[in-house]
Image (cartoon, grey):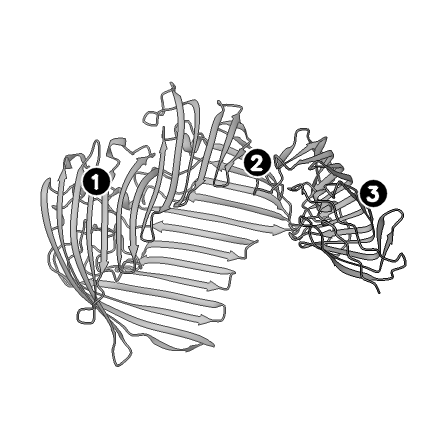
Amino acid sequence: MKKASLTCLTALPLLLCAPVAAQAQDDAPPAAPAAADETTQSATGTAAGATESRDVAFSADELAYDSDNETVTARGDVRMNSEGNNLRADRIVWTRKTDEIRAEGNVRLVTPEGDVAYGDSVLLSDSMRDAVAQNLLLVLEGGGRLAAERAERKNGFTTLYRAAYTPCAVTHPNGCPKNPTWQITAVKVVHDPFRNRIRYEGAAVNLFGARIIALPWLSHPDGSEGGGSGLLVPELRISQSNGVELSAPYYFKLAPDKDATLTPHIYTDVLPMLEGRYRQLTSRGAFQIGGYITHGSRIPLDDLSRTDRDEGIRAYIEGNGRFQLDPKWSVTASGRYVTDRTFLRRYDISRDTRLRSMVDAERITHDSYVSIAGWAFQGLRISDVAGSQPIVLPAIDARFRLDDPIWDGKIELQANSLAVLRTEGQDTQRAFASARWERRSITSLGQELVLTGYARGDLYHTSDTALTGNPLYRGEPGWHGRGIAAAAAELRWPLIGSFMGGTQRLTPRIQVVASPPTNNLEIPNEDARAVDLEDSNLFALNRFPGYDRWEDGARVTYGVDWGFDLPGVTARTTIGQSYRLSEKETILPPGTGLSDRFSDYVGRTTVKVGHKLSFVHRFRLDKDDLELRRNEIDAVVGGHQTYATIGYLRLNRDIDPAFEDLRDREEIRLGGRIKFARYWSLFGSTIIDLTDSEEDPASGADGYEPVRHRIGLSYDDDCIEIGVTWRRDYDTTGDFRRGNTFLFRVALKNLGR
């Protein structure tokens, strides 16, 4: 067996026949090959050439050199490898005079990216810069397929004739051939490597074997730079308020670290709306800004009987971002603003009833936390008064944990300052400093003992108190100080044993808390209004949710935790009650479960069975007659593809209607998805308001008031998603009308932008 040395560039040009990024090479012509006998039976070798040439490893059953015609012919399982590109063919002929290389018979090329190209024959010329391939099939690493009757590459441009592209499977799981779900066919496809784009002529989309839409000017990026500008998937929607809506988003790739999307929304019943979004990644973090703008009319919310409309610009803007200034300091910001109360609901952008804007600078270390923040709110409910919405600036919170323990306990120091401003309401400023000592230990009997000491000093100033409707929230105008102290001891005794083949844990708990009388009513209440006894605050030092109210006096809290574990099954439950030792009248409102000396019973039960069942039940039982005062259920049954969700909430606390933050209500939420016939899914959800006049006299509800429901059908396989959704809203607010909304969506996967 003789070895022949051959200088060749590479087998890359076959890949360049496909519409992907390519770079023309300026390699020097190959050097003359060493002579080889025409009857060589087998040859293997590694080519080495001039300075700008590349090494090519090759092997063949037979290698022959015709010195008269200056051709080199390799036959029989010819294999060539260069820089990770592997070429196979039955026969390869290199003609030195014309500098042409022809690969024939079962041509196959595998690229370093995993793409596989097939062809009957490939002709390479001009130092392998240009190429022509017949019956090309390119199988992309991502699963897509590109086929063409003929492909050629000249002067860097690649052109495909009578081509088709699909990312869909072309065979059934059993290996039998099938038509792809969708494909793009074209008379001609041109890849421009200088603009990194692919242009189609005579293109059309075929869905389930039928031609559905022509795309005469289709053009998209080649993916060499991570995508580029182009049209995204459009949406079709029909609603009672706006009629038929067509939105067609267009994506702009401005740079590798920034992009934008512009979406026109066209309606049949109202004027068009323009949506825009901008995103950018910086060396410190990322941010995005988006918004909507249109011109239209709206009905005032304060007088729905009026027929005249207020016309003008209607808009919504939002943005958020986070920046890491150094390993310790970061800044987070978000902002939202809308021109009127019903714009978000009218155009189906959001159903939020309150918009929040904030900026927060944080410093975090292993033993400290500092936050300097500001907040602003915009209320969208009918009852919201713009001037009474708070602006919180600044809101400062600093916490420090001391390294050296005192009496074997950890010390945490806190300083907090807050200023609440309103243009037409009460203003409040607050500052306090506190220290908390906590010691955890294990007794000789295995009990966990937690001792806590707490001390705090407050300073408040408030003005315009008469503008606050509820006297319990006002406080007294002017400057006021307050001192707070508390001591607590909690004992937990975990008992572990076997049960039903698993492990159970029974943990009785008892806590004693003592705090001297505290001045509360002179202090304004900004952050502690929504108080309610729950399992999460049963053993808390202060059951009020914020800092402005403090639960003083002495009390005993007792309860029990139970847990059970089996492989794939977990169950947790907790229940408890507290007893106030002091006979002093409390400031906790009746109905919260804490107003009497004995509190209500409160608890929570959680059950999980693998990934098929998740059940959470929160409850509060009246201490006198065990009536359910709070009944909350959240359950998910099923797997990822077929499941049902159930949510139920009933607050039956009989609280004075003056406390708007504690209104009673009852609602049920149902949802689910059923997958069938492999790719099809039926889904739906509903929200029903079950509140009646006995639970909330101000609501005017009759005990059964649907809020919203939707039902949809979707088809989702490996390369296409089709969905239709029907939604009905039952609430009319201003120019947002109750009625039906239909949404149609078609998304072709793996098409890119």
Viewer-nearest residue: 448 or 608: 448
SS at mark 1 in the image? strand
* Tag count: 3
Q: Amino acid at mark 3?
A: Lys
Q: Residue furthest top?
A: 308
The residue that disc 3 covers is 97
The residue that disc 2 covers is 232
Q: Which mark is residue 438?
A: none
The N terminus is located in which quarter?
bottom right
SS at mark 3 in the image? loop
User: Upstream in the sequence, badge 3 or badge 2?
Assistant: 3
Q: Residue at x 27, y 80 (%)?
A: 445
Q: Measure how far apart labels 2 and 1 are at the Cα level.
A: 44 Å
User: Upstream in the sequence, badge 2 or badge 1?
Assistant: 2
| Up/down of 631 relative to 338, above or below | below
Q: Position of residue 486 (x, y in %)?
A: 15, 61
SS at mark 2 in the image? loop
Q: Residue at x 39, y 66 (%)?
A: 572
Q: Residue at x 89, y 48 (%)?
A: 68
Q: Splitting the image into 4 quarters, where does residue 57 fall? A: bottom right
Q: Position of residue 203 (x, y in %)?
A: 71, 33
Q: Residue at x 29, y 74 (%)?
A: 493
| Marks 2 & 1, CB-CB < 8 Å contact | no
Q: Position of residue 590 (x, y in %)?
A: 22, 51
Q: Measure how far apart labels 1 and 3 are at the Cα level.
A: 87 Å
The reply to whether residue 220 is in sight is: yes
Give the label, 2 or 1, closer to the camera: 2
Give the label, 1 or 3, closer to the camera: 3
Viewer-nearest residue: 700 or 574: 574
Q: Which mark is residue 420?
A: 1
Q: Position of residue 137 (x, y in %)?
A: 75, 46
Q: Amino acid at mark 2?
A: Leu
